[in-house]
Image: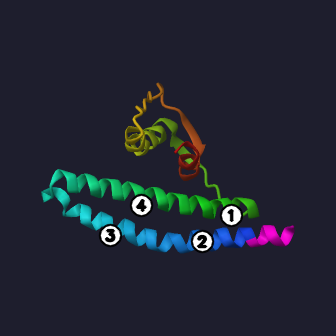
Amino acid sequence: RQDLERLRSEIVHHVSHELKTPLTSAVFALDLLSEFSEEWPEEARQSLEVASLSVQHASQMAADLMDAGRSESGKLRVDPVPGDLGNLMGLVHAAMTPLAHKAGLTLTTREPQPPIAARFDAARLRQVLG
C-alpha cells in the first residue's frame, strides 16, 4: 500500500510538473498577443480573453496539484506576512468574477470597515478562496 501511495504521489508530481512548463509558455504567448489586441475585432479580443483565463486556470490547477503533493509530504511552505484581508478579497473577487459571469452567476463582496489587518499567506489563501 505504501508503494502504491508513493507511486501515486510521484505520478502527480511529474504530471503537474510536465503540465506547468507548456502552460507557462502559453501564458507568456497570450500575454504578448494581448499587447497587440487593441486593434483586433471585439470577437477576437474576447476569444483571447477566454483563452487567457483558461490557460491561467489550468496553470493554477497544475500548481495546486504540486502543492497537494507537497502538503502530503509535509513540504508545503506557508509564508504568512502582514496584510489587509479586504484587499485580498478584492483580488479574489476580481479574479473570480469572469468565471462567475461565464456560469451565469453574480459575485458580490463588501469591503470590511475598518480594514482587517492580519498575518496570512496570500497565495495559499487565494487557493482556498478561489
Mark 1–mark 3 contact, CB under 8 Å? no
- Residue at the image position 28 percent from the left and 58 percent from the top: 48
| 6 drawn magenta | yes
As drawn, the residue found furthest toward the left would be 39
Q: Earlier in the sequence, mark 4 or mark 3?
A: 3
Range of residues picked out in magenta: 1-7
Above or below — where is 19 with respect to 45?
below
Q: Tell which tag, 1 or 4, sits nearer the viewer.
A: 4
Above or below — where is 7 with respect to 64?
below
| Amino acid type at mark 2 | Val
Which SS class for mark 2?
Answer: helix
Q: CA distance from mark 2 to mark 3?
A: 22 Å
Q: CA distance from mark 4 to mark 3?
A: 11 Å
- Residue at the image position 16 percent from the left and 56 percent from the top: 38
Q: Which mark is residue 55?
A: 4
Q: Position of residue 117 (x, y in %)?
A: 54, 36
The residue at which mark 3 appears reads as 29
Q: Which mark is residue 69?
A: 1
| Amino acid type at mark 3 | Ala
Q: Position of residue 13 (x, y in %)?
A: 64, 70
